[in-house]
Image (tube, rainbow, N blue to C red):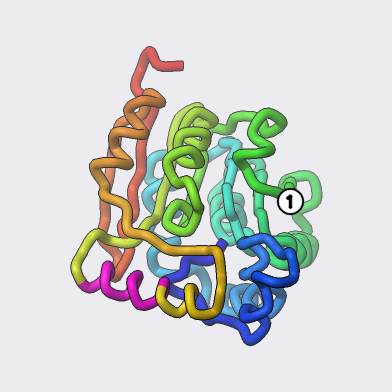
Amino acid sequence: MMSALNATIPPEADAAATTGRTPFDFYGPRVAASDLRSYRTKGPRQSTKALVSALVADGVTGATVLDIGGGVGVIGYELLDADAASVTNVEASAAYLAAAREESARRGLAGRVTLQLGDFTELVASIPPADIVTLDRVLNVYPDWERLGSMAAERAHHVLGIVVPRDTPMVRQVVVVMNVVLRLRRQPIRARVIQIEAIDRMARRAGLARTCSHAVGAWQVLAFRRIPGHA
């Protein structure tokens, strides 16, 4: 799911509230195609690149990866290139998952990438834990960020990686403006800024402690590692 801070609201968004579509369908084929094209030509966004670098520095060789709201699959491809063993991308947008399927096939990753369509909080019982779990620009647009974050943290054997908007006055102002536009277009989806301390508390309840925090533009890159003795 693309963060609302980067969202280009597609023309078809105005009708979404009256057609029975879910909030995740906001991220439709046009946005997915744009994201895939951008990745192919420019590589990962800077905040995504920073998250990947933090995970690789911690060690990813042979690791299993669970990327929640993985979009076109960028984190998965980057970690597989760094010798991760396999990736599961759980994505609620059908358009994003279709783009991820196209890119995975183009890269010849059959057998190493699993694509699962749906809301992770509804599928969690059927999703195996992984060594590394990632939420890149997802918590800030999910209706119940703490529930999603807690479920994700519990699925992380070793490391949890998160990217969220920075908690600054300027970023908060951008989010307010974006939410006004979304409200005017009758979209149920909203963005938010989450305090890092609240994320820390959520992670600690799941037995994880923050190991790094980097500001990259308007984004905060966070990594958490499981505390020894907390299964």
Residue 64: x %, y % from top left? 60, 37
On screen, residue 95 above or below 115 = below
Disc 1: CA contacts within 10 A as few (<14), some (14-19) or many (>=20): some
Q: In which quadrant of the rendered image does the N terminus lie?
A: bottom right
Q: Is residue 107 visible?
A: no
Q: Give the structural element (helix, strand or loop) at label 1.
A: strand
Magenta run includes residue 177:
yes
The residue at which mark 1 appears reads as: 117
Instruction: Kindly give the residue lying farthest to the left in the view shown.
Output: 169
Residue at the image position 32 percent from the left and 41 percent from the top? 199
**Would residue 141 be found to the left or right of residue 12 on screen?**
left
Magenta run includes residue 95:
no
Residue at the image position 51 percent from the left and 37 percent from the top? 152
Q: Is residue 128 visible?
A: yes
What span is colored magenta in the figure? 170-179
On screen, residue 66 above or below 139 = above
On screen, residue 171 above or below 24 = below
On screen, residue 48 above or below 64 = below
Q: Nearer the viewer, residue 178 or 82?
A: 178
Instruction: Kindly give the residue lying farthest to the front in the view shown.
Output: 18
Residue 212: x %, y % from top left? 27, 44
Q: How many marks?
A: 1
| Residue 74 position by quadrant | bottom right
